[in-house]
Image: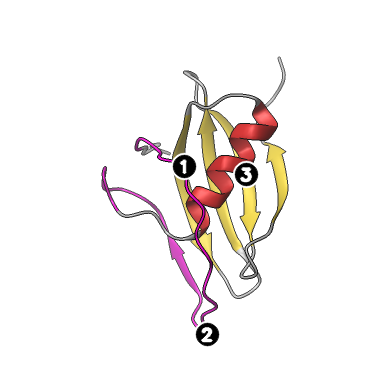
């Protein structure tokens, strides 16, 4: 699976609910981030104690947006779920420790 990334600028934005279910994978460098992505970038960066984060992909559903984030030079895989009320959860390292 190819990993696609882009430089991240931190910022918070409100999330808007949608009746549609869509799954998106970021393939275009410089694409406009979804409202959930900056929220998760900030939370993953804080949790991982590393500001070098890139988007690996995201998928939207009514329950929440799953954002996959690469951290550090090795792009260690993390996940975050952003909810429509602006909160996040499920922030978790998805790789192996050794």
Quadrant of res 54: top left
Rendered image: mark on residue 19: 2
Crowd tier of the residue under label 2, counting other residues whose Cα lies within 10 Å: few below 14, some 14–19, many 20 or above: few
Q: Disc 3 on helix, strand or loop?
A: strand
Residue at mark 3: 79
Q: Secondary structure at mark 2?
A: loop
Q: Provide the residue designation for mark 1.
A: 10
- In the rendered image, the quadrant that contains the C terminus is top right
- Indicate yes or no whether the magenta region holds residue 34: no
Q: Are marks 1 and 3 in contact (CB under 8 Å)?
A: no
Quarter of the image holding residue 76?
A: top right
Is 17 situated above or below 25? below
User: Percent x, y for residue 51?
Assistant: 53, 27
Q: CA distance from mark 2 to mark 1?
A: 27 Å
Image x and y of residue 17, in percent: 55, 78
Considering every residue shown, the one lying at the far top of the view is 98
Q: Comparing marks 1 and 3, which lies closer to the viewer?
A: 1
Main secondary structure type of the part rendered in magenta: loop
The mark that comes first in sequence, 1 or 3, is 1
Q: Residue at x 54, y 42 (%)?
A: 41
On screen, 31 above or below 21?
Answer: above
Residue under the image location 46 percent in, 48 percent down = 57
Which tag, 3 or 2, sits closer to the chain's start? 2
């Amino acid at each position: 699976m190819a990993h696609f990334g882009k430089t991240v600028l931190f910022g918070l934005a409100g999330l808007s609910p949608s009746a549609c279910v869509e799954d998106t994978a970021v393939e275009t460098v410089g694409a406009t981030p979804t409202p959930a992505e900056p929220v998760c970038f900030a939370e993953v960066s804080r949790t991982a104690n590393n500001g070098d984060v890139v988007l690996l992909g995201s998928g939207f559903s009514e329950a929440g947006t799953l954002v996959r984030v690469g951290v550090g030079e090795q792009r260690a895989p993390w996940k975050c779920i952003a909810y429509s009320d602006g909160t996040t959860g499920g922030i978790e390292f998805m790789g192996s420790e050794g």
